[in-house]
């Protein structure tokens, strides 16, 4: 049995072509078995992307847990930022590479288990994080993000109230300057800004 957050997937591949309109542009995304939201753009991911003020996104951006690639591809298509995308799931990484090409975006996609292969610091880390991996790994992703952000860099993520959005947001206040960007049908989009050294 494989899950969408496994490194290697042992189920048969069955690619599907989906389309999604985000911010007035249509994107084509190939998805597959055992990749998150294989039927197409997830509602939480859509809420996240539609909450971001795209004009404010620039510099170095990391799409953490990129899946088949919607976040990084959307950011690269609408900004001049340098976009890295990582995931643990090899099938997702291969799809994200194909989707980047289909949507004419030049991004850098590679495997990483949490931040194991991340060597850079980012202005933005943007993620619809994996929840089913459990609280320990989720908190490693959210809290350790600050070690991979530049000073005043931002971690932006989406989480549902049924997945503990309120308590996660409260816990993040111990590590970041936290702002709620949007609440939509149970989804919370949360901005965590890294403290500057002076604070
Ligand atoms: C909720 S999905 C979001 C996928 C995609 N960004 C989207 O919005 O459709 C979370 C992603 O995190 C990945 N993931 C899970 N555990 C991970 C880990 N330890 N390191 C890196 N990525 C991981 C999963 O494989 C999955 O693709």
Image (spheres, rainbow, N blue to C red):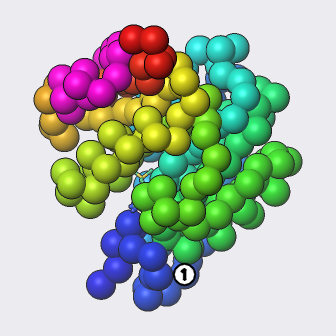
The residue lying toward the viewer, choosing from 41 and 163, is 163
Give me the residue at 44% from left, 24% from top. Answer: 194
Q: Is residue 25 visible?
A: no
Q: Where residue 121 appears, x then y in whole percent?
A: 61, 40
Q: Where residue 113 appears, x then y in whole percent?
A: 45, 65
Circle 1 SS class: loop
Q: Where residue 199 appears, x then y in whole percent?
A: 39, 11
Give me the residue at 73% from left, 28% from top. Answer: 59
Would you call the spot at circle 1 few (<14 residues within 10 Å), some (14-19), or many (20 or more)? few
- In this picture, residue 123 sits left or right of residue 80: left
Q: How many marks overall? A: 1
Question: Quick check: which quadrant has ligand 1?
Answer: bottom left
Question: In the image, is residue 14 above or below residue 23?
Answer: below
Which residue appears farthest toward the front when viewing the image?
Answer: 198
Question: In the image, is residue 182 above or below residue 115?
Answer: above
- Magenta residues, start to end: 168-184
The residue where tag 1 is placed is 13
Q: Where residue 71 appears, x then y in whole percent?
A: 59, 41
The residue lying toward the viewer, choosing from 94 and 80, is 80
Q: Is residue 34 visible?
A: yes
In the rendered image, residue 39 lying in the magenta stretch gets the answer no
Give me the residue at 56% from left, 62% from top. Answer: 117
In the rendered image, residue 173 lying in the magenta stretch gets the answer yes
Question: Quarter holding the N terminus?
Answer: bottom left
The residue lying toward the viewer, choosing from 58 and 129, is 58
- In this picture, residue 149 sits left or right of residue 29: left
Give me the residue at 42% from left, 19% from top. Answer: 195
């Amino acid at each position: 049995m494989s899950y969408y957050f496994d490194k290697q997937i042992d189920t048969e591949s069955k690619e599907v072509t989906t389309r999604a309109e985000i911010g007035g542009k249509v994107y084509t995304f190939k998805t597959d078995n055992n990749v998150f939201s294989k039927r197409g753009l997830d509602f939480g991911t859509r809420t996240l992307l539609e909450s971001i003020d795209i004009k404010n996104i620039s510099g170095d951006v990391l799409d953490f847990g990129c899946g088949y690639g919607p976040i990084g591809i959307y950011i690269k298509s609408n900004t001049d930022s340098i976009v890295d995308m990582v995931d643990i799931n090899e099938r997702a990484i291969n799809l994200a590479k194909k989707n980047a090409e289909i949507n004419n975006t030049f991004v850098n996609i590679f495997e990483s288990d949490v931040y194991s292969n991340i060597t850079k610091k980012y202005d933005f880390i943007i993620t619809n994080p994996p929840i089913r991996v459990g609280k320990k790994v989720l908190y490693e992703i959210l809290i350790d993000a600050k070690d991979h952000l530049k000073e005043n860099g931002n971690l932006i993520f989406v989480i549902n109230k049924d997945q503990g959005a309120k308590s996660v947001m409260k816990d993040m206040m111990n590590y970041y300057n936290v702002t709620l960007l949007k609440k939509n049908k149970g989804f919370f989009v949360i901005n965590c800004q890294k403290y500057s050294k002076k604070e």
